[in-house]
Image (cartoon, rainbow, N blue to C red):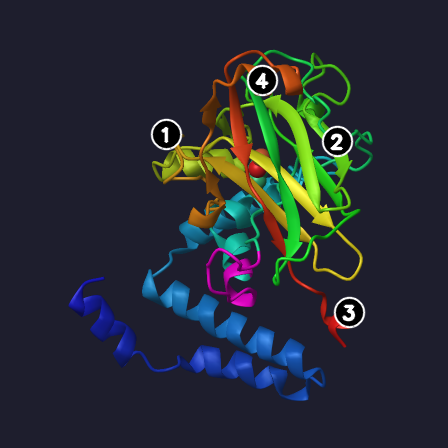
């Protein structure tokens, strides 16, 4: 930001129009709603003033929001995509989850994304969820709490894209339940499943958000990842993902969901005995990763 811009912002007093609009909130009996509306009005007015927004630009903005709304239905949610691409979704997570990132720290969250589907099949420990081609990978580790105690019988839902960059729910050509499944952690908190190494893929670009990315010179790619939704009674739910360290987009995720603690290495396992034990070709990718759950507020009381 240039010094002139900073000076202009500092000099700016609340505009009389802003004052008039803020005054209309005096009768609002809901303190939180009043706080939110107050800040919203101040910020949108300041935004219009800062960029000296023209009537034509505002009409284009309204048109953009209208198109965004028209692209929302039971399956597609373009407003969430807008929030994701503007970094607002991950900003909320950053505001509300302040924690140190250490080895025993709780696993960080990432975005759920629009492709989560309820009703995944229950799978046994070690099951293979890949019904389409890919580089074989084994994912394994333990669910533990912050003291290192195992968390048994937790529900672990996983989903990832096929090699064509599409989730099963987006692609009628994929077999039912491809690359998604529901597992339970074992008595020692252990989990394992076989799948494939994920590939990077573009977020949906056939709507106004895709056009916005293009207009501002941004790419729509997400680095390769596997989603995890982990639920256990008495613990906070973890909505997260594991990202591949060797991915070309790991530093420039279109929706800002990557956190360094969630980047994992796909280690090439060349052990013939391991390949035999897991019924995988030799070599295969081996991803070993624990998840650290936090006791929920209610359970802690
Ligand atoms: C996903 O990872 O599935 C995703 C997340 C945010 C926006 C689009 C896709
Ligand atoms: Fe995804």
Rounded to the nearest whole Å, what is the CA distance between mark 4 and mark 2?
Answer: 19 Å
Number of residues whose C-alpha sits closer than 10 Å to that of mark 3, classed few (under 14), some (14–19) or many (20 or more):
few
Q: Is residue 105 magenta?
A: yes
| Residue occupied by mark 1 | 248
Tell me where the magenta segment starts and ends, as one range: 93-106
Lower sequence index among marks 4 and 3: 4
**Element carrying mark 1:** loop
> N-terminal of the two: label 2 or label 3?
2
Callout in the foreground (2, 3): 2
Mark 1 and mark 2 in contact (Cβ < 8 Å)? no
| Residue positioned 64% across, 44% down in the render | 142
243 is higher (above) or lower (below) than 51: above
Residue 41 horizontal/vertical position (percent): 52, 72
On whether residue 11 falls in the magenta region, the answer is no
Q: Is residue 56 left or right of residue 199?
A: left
Q: Which residue is mark 3?
A: 299
Cβ atoms at labels 4 and 3 below 8 Å apart = no
Q: Mark 1 and mark 3: span between their CA atoms?
A: 41 Å
Name the residue carrying label 2: 125
Q: Secondary structure at mark 3?
A: helix
Real-space CA distance between mark 2 and mark 3, rounded to the nearest whole angstrom: 27 Å
């Amino acid at each position: 930001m240039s010094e002139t811009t900073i000076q202009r912002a500092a000099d700016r007093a609340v505009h009389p129009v802003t004052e008039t609009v803020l005054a209309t909130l005096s009768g609002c009996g809901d303190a939180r709603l009043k706080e939110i509306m107050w800040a919203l009005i101040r910020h949108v007015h300041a935004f219009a003033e800062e960029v000296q927004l023209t009537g034509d630009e505002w009409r284009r903005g309204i048109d953009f929001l209208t198109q965004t709304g028209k692209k929302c239905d039971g399956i597609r949610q373009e407003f969430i995509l807008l929030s994701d691409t503007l970094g607002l979704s991950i900003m909320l997570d950053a505001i509300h989850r302040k924690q140190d990132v250490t080895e025993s720290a709780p696993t960080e969250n990432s975005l759920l994304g629009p492709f989560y589907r309820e009703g995944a099949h229950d799978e046994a420990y070690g099951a293979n969820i890949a019904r389409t081609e890919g580089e074989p990978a084994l994912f394994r580790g333990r669910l533990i709490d912050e003291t290192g105690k195992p968390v048994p019988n937790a529900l672990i839902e996983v989903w990832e894209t096929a090699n064509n960059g599409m989730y099963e729910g987006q692609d009628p050509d994929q077999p039912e339940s491809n690359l998604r499944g529901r597992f339970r952690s074992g008595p020692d908190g252990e989990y394992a499943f076989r799948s494939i190494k994920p590939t990077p893929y573009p977020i949906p670009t056939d709507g106004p958000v895709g056009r916005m990315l293009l207009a501002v010179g941004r790419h729509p790619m997400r680095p390769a990842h596997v989603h995890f939704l982990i639920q256990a009674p008495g613990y906070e739910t973890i909505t997260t993902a594991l990202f591949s360290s060797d991915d070309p987009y790991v530093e420039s995720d279109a929706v800002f969901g990557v956190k360094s603690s969630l980047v994992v290495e796909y280690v090439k396992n060349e052990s013939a005995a391991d390949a035999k034990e897991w019924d995988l070709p030799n070599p295969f990718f081996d991803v070993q990763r624990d998840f650290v759950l936090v006791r929920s507020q209610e359970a802690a009381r």
